[in-house]
Image: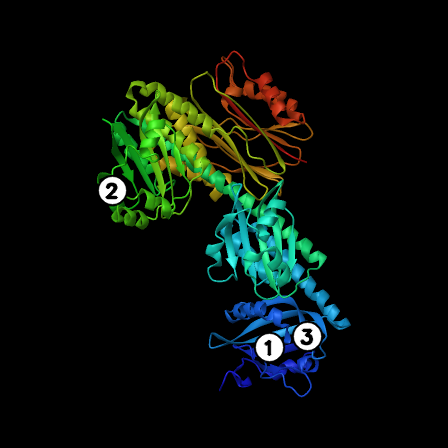
Amino acid sequence: MTVNSPECWPAEPRLLDAFDTTAFVADAGGVIVYANQAARRLYARAGRALEGSDLLGLFEESERVALAQVVRQVLAGSPWTGRLEVARADSSRHGADVRCAPLFRDDGVVGLLWVIEDSGSDRGEGRAARRLSERLTRLARVTAELVMADTVEAVTKIVTSHIADAVGATVATLMLREGEDTVRLVGLRGGREGEAQQWERFSIDTPTPVSDVIRTGERLIVTGEAAIAERYPNLETRGERSIICLPLRVTARTIGAVGLSFPGIRTMDAAELEFLEIMGDTCAQALERINASDDAAKQTARLAFLADASIELASSLDYEATLSKVARLAVPTFADWCAIDVVQDGRLNRLAVAHVDPAKVELAHSLQRKYPPDPNAPTGPWEVVRTGRAQLIPEITDEMLVAAARDEDQLRIGRDLQLRSALTVPLKARGRVLGLITWVTSESGRRYGPDDLGFAEHLARRASVAIDNAELHSQTLAAAVQLQRAVLPDILPAAAGWQVANYYSPSGRTDVCGDFYDAVPIGDGRLAVFVGDVMGRGVAAAAAMAQMRAAVRAYTAVDPTPEAVMSKLDLLFAQNESEQLVTLVYVLLDPESDDLAVANAGHPPPVILRRDLSTEQLPLASGPPLGATPGHREQVTMPFGGGDTLLAFTDGLVERRDEDIDQGMGRLLRTLPVMAGPDLPTALDHLIRHTRDPSQDDDVAALAVRRVV
């Protein structure tokens, strides 16, 4: 049996004669092995059989190059649906919806089924309308997928596969703006070999459809090989094609573009174009949401790292051992390599090196001994020592490795290490550079930017304290204050459907307290808020507060329900055997169910100002503070509708000397209606002034949340 014999196909091809839709069966080489009656009626020329002829011969020669890409895609196992111009036997040309599906035998593709629904008749026009409806339905489904996507990889797959399949594009790209002047390729399907490397990164001034769309923020359509070649000669397009490029807009910014390339001369219905633009906007919003979530996770991890590093730096006067621990803390969360050098007797002494692979740690030490840094080099570690200014290398290129290498062996080692990006920050104290901290990425492939540099400098300031023994106490206290300021959010995140306001006032000018708060949008409309109080003051309280806030945010990302968060916090304290006590109230507000769920670990209960100005106090704590002997904790659900306002706070708001706390809670409930004002931050300040004891020097933290009607 040969491929050209009908018996090799999975179904009897003559069954296709029962349909009035044009259908062809072709082998893997594109040769027609069967054409149904509708196909022979419309496309067979007098005295010539369709069987045995090239299927692509039905289309204009200028379109065949592009259609060859369709054939390759389908032979790889991926069906294709699109719209093309086809030529009938009478030489008339009509727009048609074309479907091409692989035919399998023994788990391999042995041929193709082509179905052409010609729109050159009344019946064809009806079918075309139906096909348009189907395409719009597919686009709507893809848009829904984008709404649910939670990673850049997921968005990329949706754009380059699902969207392309929905509209019949054989080439699809997702490109994002990187900085002000660079465009980066995130995803590509259907491109030529080497095209991904060619367009991995390029200047926004390069004449391409994507760069034009990112600059202008406007949709772009270019139809035909001649028009594409004239406008974009460096695209190397062969055969008739059509290009549609959609901007990814977020508010007033264009963050990237989606490029779709179609075989032949492709026209888009207005409704289809509108759907594509909606899809582009949804894609942009998904990417912005994912980036915001990633940034929040990165900031949380940074703050937790700063807390851990600060504890290490404050825990011992042995700065060598302490800095070694700090280097290990940085790997692999923020660096693949971390090295700390101190200046001693005019030389750089390598104090610590950290890498996940112990063998590479020893390699770093041996390289330092064999190739010590050149003190006279215009760049590198000694330049940082001389100037006291940090040095950021966003991308380590091979040209840089060649320029820095002293011999072939050093160059080979540098290449083998796959160094990608680096930043070096000085350790300075009282105007003197004491040493350096260097972070390098390799295997992870990440690149450092200005935010990373600022964070590294923040860490370096704390590390310098451990080296400068003369001011150990005062510098440690300053570091704790800076840590608390860094952890407590100056501006709470915006959350659609919610108004959020905060108030924070430590008791003294220089003392450090353990009050903390935060509001975390969940992403599905819900909002998690929490307020806590670490017992005590000073470095330990600030560090514990930073760890607690980071832990609560991390657990919220896994499961935001109060019961789950409190359970994980109890487990955290049990495993670490901490002597620190922490009170915490955690509330999850859900607009879809018009309620809130709360769990309370020894904290003053929040209060609610209802829309009708009635007031209500949430239940008292159902268990002891975190760090005490764990007891039973209950998750309580209460109604929370549009226009309701929740207020959570620390005890400094209601406590007064020689007064029972119940009196303070009663005073708060009586004063609570002043928060009915339209401007929530102003209303919260007004409430604080009328409620707290101005003569009492106590910490106060408060968080107010109003559900927007």
Q: Residues within 10 Å of mark 1 (few under 14, many from 20)?
A: many
Of residues 685 and 144, the one nearer the viewer is 144
Instruction: Give the CA distance from mark 1 to mark 3.
Output: 12 Å
Q: Nearer the viewer, residue 310 or 605?
A: 310
Q: What residue does disc 3 label?
A: 87
Label 3 secondary element: strand
Along the viewing direction, whichever of 319 and 620 lies nearer the viewer: 319
Please tell me whether residue 197 is drawn above or below residue 285 in the rendered image: below
Q: Position of residue 371 (x, y in %)?
A: 24, 40
* Residue at 62% from the left image edge and 58% from the top image edge: 230
Q: Which numbered disc covers residue 55?
A: 1
Which secondary structure lies at badge 1? helix
Q: Secondary structure at mark 2?
A: helix
Q: Mark 2 to mark 3: distance in Å?
A: 70 Å
Mark 1 or 3, nearer chain start: 1
The amino acid on which the numbered mark 1 sits, given as a three-letter code, is Leu
Residue 689 pos. (x, y %): 59, 17
Q: Residue furthest bottom?
A: 47
Circle 2: residue type? Leu
Residue 300 falls left or right of residue 252: left
Q: Earlier in the sequence, mark 2 or mark 1?
A: 1
Q: Which sits in the foreground, 110 or 620?
A: 110
Looking at the image, residue 431 lies above or below residue 23: above
Q: Are marks 2 and 1 in contact (CB under 8 Å)?
A: no
401 vs 104: above or below:
above
Q: Amino acid at mark 3?
A: Ala
Residue occupied by mark 2: 367
Q: Are marks 2 and 3 in contact (CB under 8 Å)?
A: no
How is colour applied across the structure in the image? rainbow
| View extreme (right): residue | 122
